[in-house]
């Protein structure tokens, strides 16, 4: 059974930092491209950051310079370090695992940034 379990969300003031974690099970983690997406109320889900199986990273323009995605294949965990948070970063953040066209999602973790 595949499980992606996010943690680390919460409420923070603008300018603050949070670190999200996503623990995966039931997949060959090291082969998957892992990603973080977010969905704000009334908006479509959007990509935040990706990290490939080889460690290559890609970021949305909104995340560049503020967020860092990383992975620990020994722990089957992907992280999103978020700093200089803004109110517009408020959203539910979802972990995604993708391999050979199959995509799996976690349940999401709420991040709320107050001004």
Image (spheres, helix red, strand yellow):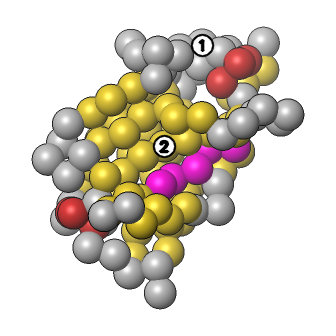
Q: Residue at x 21, y 63 (%)?
A: 30
Query: Which of marks 2 and 1 precedes in the sequence?
Result: 1
Q: Is residue 66 visible?
A: no
Q: Is residue 72 magenta?
A: no
Is the residue marked by circle 1 packed among few (<14), some (14-19), or many (20+) residues within 10 Å? some
Q: Residue at x 65, y 15 (%)?
A: 86
Give the position of the C terminus as an image quadrant: top right
Seen in the picture, residue 75 relative to 3 is either above or below; the reply is above
Residue 40: x, y in percent? 75, 34
Q: Which residues are magenta?
A: 92-96
Q: Residue 102 appears in which quarter of the rendering?
A: bottom left
Magenta highlight: main SS: strand
The image's mark for residue 56 is none
Provide the secondary structure element on which disc 2 rests.
strand
Density class for disc 2 (Cα within 10 Å; few <14, some 14-19, many ≥20) is many
Point out which mark residue 36 bears.
2
Residue lying at the far bottom of the rendered structure: 1
Whether tag 1 and tag 2 are in contact, CB under 8 A, the answer is no
Residue 6 point in image, percent of width and height: 55, 57
Residue 68 falls left or right of residue 87: left
Q: Is residue 95 magenta?
A: yes
Residue 93 vertical placement versus 41 (above, below): below
Judging by the rendered image, the residue that carries numbered circle 1 is: 15
Q: Is residue 56 left or right of residue 40?
A: left
21 to 15, vertically: above or below: below
Q: Position of residue 56 (x, y in %)?
A: 20, 36
Query: Which residue is painted at 60% across and 13% down in the image?
Result: 15
């Amino acid at each position: 059974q595949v499980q992606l379990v996010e943690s680390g969300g919460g409420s923070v003031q603008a300018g603050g930092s949070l670190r999200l974690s996503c623990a995966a099970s039931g997949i060959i983690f090291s082969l998957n491209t892992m990603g973080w997406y977010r969905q704000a109320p009334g908006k479509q889900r959007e990509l935040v950051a990706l990290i490939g199986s080889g460690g290559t990273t890609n970021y949305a323009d909104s995340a560049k310079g503020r967020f860092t995605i990383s992975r620990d294949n020994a722990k089957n965990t992907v992280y999103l370090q978020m700093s200089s948070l803004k109110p517009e970063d408020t959203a539910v953040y979802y972990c995604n695992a993708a391999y050979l066209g199959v995509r799996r999602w976690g349940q999401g973790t709420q991040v709320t940034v107050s001004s």
